Amino acid sequence: MRLFSVHANDRAIMSSTPANNDDETPKDPLQEMLANLLGGQGMEGFDPAELAKAAGLPSDPNALAQMFAQVQSMMSGSSDTPVNWELAHDAARKAAAGDDPSVTPAQQREVDEALRLAEMWLDPYTDLAATSIIGRAWSRAEWVEETLGTWQRLTEPVANSIAFAISTAMNEQLPAEMKAMMGDAANMMQNMGGALFGLQLGQAVGALAKEVLGSTDIGIPLADLQMALLPANVKAFGEGLEVPEQEIRLFLALREAAHARLFVQVPWLRGHLLGAIESYARGIHIDMSRIEDLAHNLDPSNPEAMQAALSEGVFMPARTPDQEAALSKLETALALVEGWVDELTFEAASNLPAAAAIRETIRRRRATGGPAEHAFGSLVGLELRPRRLREAAALWASLKEQRGIVGRDAIWAHPDLLPTAADLDDAAGFSARRSAEDASEADVDAALAKLLDGGFEDNEPLKHEPQESGEPEPGKQDPDTDNPADL
């Protein structure tokens, strides 16, 4: 990012100092390093407008000047974290600001009424009690404000890794004498990495604000203890469905209220999901070889290739086996949440004529993800999509038939009770497998309890071992006394 902000100054310095163009005169070390990293073209080969376009940034000079001023301010300062979250916040607000009308009192009233009615409709279909949360209608900018803290929590491990990788690459590649000449340039490069990540994250969150329908639209509660819908996005979602907007709003309110009820009445669930995502993110390491290849092969005259490389997540290496296992558990948990909400919502929406059509539209939407969700996935190496939503919904429907509403919802009592990926493969056999596991655990518990109570004597023989006393075993003769010939 600093390349853009110093472009004009470098031109002025180079034109006013001809000696710097002489091959026998040492060049500015920072300029020379950047020229080598960027294909040897130096600062003269860059067009700020083209590079801004490649990075997905606004091309308006005033907007760019304001944005780069923020980045430059970050680079010259110090922070406890490598990412300027204020910069990410500003970028998210700007990305969400286009065509973002303020919520009207009428829209607020419609959303509040829909969420209140949804709570009443859900009551007969779940054992989890209703919440006392007041429903809200949010603009896109308000969604950004309410959720950015959670995005920071989820992405900070990746942001730290990227900033550290850039700093490490700089320290490893520079000769010792150049490091002394560069001074604080390593810190500048680390800050630049944090600035780039903050800008990209902000743009991804701002783009998501134009797609999401509520506070739990991606399957996790981004805003703790909140229940809300975005009227502008709800209206856009209904375009082309040929379904009355009121019916769509009520169906989406049922989903939002079901999510809220689950996360409020199952207090460990939010931490379970967010903790799993954080653990996965902490396992991400940056592929240094790909960073070096990108720097050496970068062609500033081809901004489309640069944009494609950045959007494909060039920093993310292949997942490790531990990450694959963590990802499988996370996807199963997300599928269970979405499957429960999907099944419960459809049952409660039985009076809505278009319930089946809306349900299928949402299922496909969640399975494929939107452009902004894919962009976020490339940035952090993780897409929060329930790939097995349909299997999970079928499992919850099966459990209701076998155990009833109370028995089905009792599974949320503890994370150890949750179904596994194998249970999604065979929903009908879940209860039989769980009964066998419970019986085995009951036998172990009984034996342990007897042992702790002193129920086993030290000399008590096991049933399958012969007795070692002087008495013969039942049914057998003592060869020394029972032979008639010896009497």
Image (tube, helix red, strand yellow):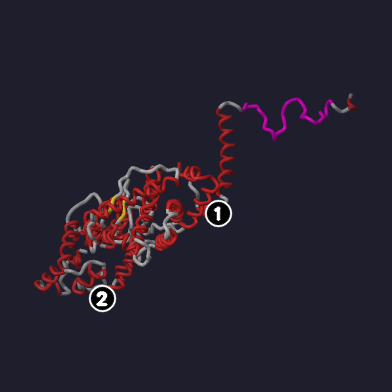
Q: Secondary structure at mark 1?
A: loop
Amino acid carrying mark 1 in the image: Asp
Q: Left or right: 73 with respect to 428?
A: left
**Looking at the picture, how far across and down is residue 231, in whole percent?**
29, 58
Q: Earlier in the sequence, mark 2 or mark 1?
A: 2
Quadrant of the frame with the N terminus: bottom left
**Looking at the picture, how far across and down is residue 254, in whole percent?**
38, 52
Which residues are the magenta region? Answer: 456-481
**Looking at the picture, how far across and down is residue 134, in whole percent?**
30, 46
Q: Residue at x 21, y 51 (%)?
A: 79
Q: Residue at x 17, y 60 (%)?
A: 72
Residue 315 vs 82, above or below: the answer is below
Label placed on residue 426: 1
Q: Left or right: 310 with respect to 482?
A: left
Amino acid carrying mark 2 in the image: Ser
The answer to whether residue 202 of the structure is visible from this angle is: yes
Q: Are marks 2 and 1 in contact (CB under 8 Å)?
A: no
Q: Which residue is mark 2?
A: 301
Q: Residue at x 33, y 66 (%)?
A: 311
